[in-house]
């Protein structure tokens, strides 16, 4: 009787694996689009963002904002270029709506992870973790 039990168990296990395997692609393909559609606000809608005063950010962020307000010159060639918002964490706007600028990190010899991203309607966003999260910055405080 053991061979029959083992055969039945193998058949059931195979059926379960096939069923789970069929579900995974459907769940995986639906989840990211549903999440980003729900999480990404419309262009100009900044109500859901944590707000911080510029004075609460690292001093280097103030330096970067001052350079932006002056129109440069910027320390890195990427500064002032279009930020594509591929992470879909900022409001959904036209492709050329956002520009990115480096916030220097003392003690490192490269651009680091900190950025100010500006919007065409004078929004200022700050990220300390290379576009994984953003806060809306009040640059007048």
Image: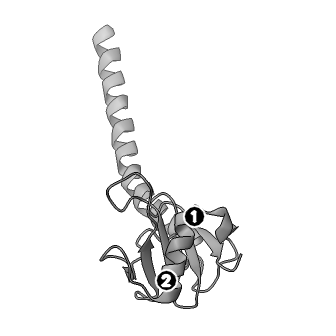
Quadrant for residue 8, please give it.
top left
The residues tagged by marks 1 and 2 sit, at their Cα atoms, a distance apart of: 15 Å
Q: Earlier in the sequence, mark 1 or mark 2?
A: 1
SS type, badge 1: helix
The residue closer to the viewer here, 59 or 24, is: 59
Q: Which residue is mark 2?
A: 68
- Residue 37 visible within the image: no
* In the image: residue 93, left or right of residue 22: right
Crowding at mark 2 (Cα within 10 Å: few <14, some 14-19, many 20+): some
Which residue shows up at 70% across the image and 76% down it?
Answer: 47
* In the image: residue 45, left or right of residue 19: right
Q: Quadrant of the N terminus?
A: top left
Which residue shows up at 60% across the image and 77% down it?
Answer: 41
Position of 139 relative to 28 (above/below) = below
Which residue shows up at 32% across the image and 33% down it?
Answer: 14
Position of 39 relative to 19 (above/below) = below
Circles 1 and 2 in contact, beta carbons < 8 Å: no
Position of 22 relative to 10 (above/below) = below
* Residue 62 horizontal/vertical position (percent): 57, 71
For residue 59, the mark is 1
Position of 139 relative to 97 (above/below) = above
* Residue 114 horizontal/vertical position (percent): 46, 62
Q: Quadrant of the C terminus?
A: bottom right
* In the image: residue 52, left or right of residue 4: right
* Residue 130 horizontal/vertical position (percent): 44, 61
- Residue 46 visible within the image: yes
For residue 30, the mark is none
The residue closer to the viewer here, 18 or 92, is: 92
* Residue 23 horizontal/vertical position (percent): 41, 51
SS type, badge 2: helix
């Amino acid at each position: 009787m053991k061979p029959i039990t083992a055969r039945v168990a193998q058949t059931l296990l195979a059926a379960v694996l096939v069923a789970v395997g069929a579900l995974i692609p459907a769940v995986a393909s639906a989840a990211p689009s549903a999440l980003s559609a729900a999480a990404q606000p419309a262009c100009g809608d900044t109500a859901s963002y944590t707000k911080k005063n510029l004075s609460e950010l690292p001093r280097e962020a103030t330096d970067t904002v001052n350079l932006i307000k002056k129109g440069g010159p910027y320390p890195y060639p990427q500064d002032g270029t279009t930020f594509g918002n591929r992470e879909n964490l900022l409001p959904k706007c036209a492709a050329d709506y956002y520009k990115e600028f480096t916030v220097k990190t003392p003690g490192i010899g490269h651009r680091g992870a900190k950025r100010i991203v500006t919007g065409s309607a004078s929004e200022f966003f700050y990220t300390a973790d290379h576009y994984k999260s953003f806060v809306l910055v009040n640059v007048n405080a």
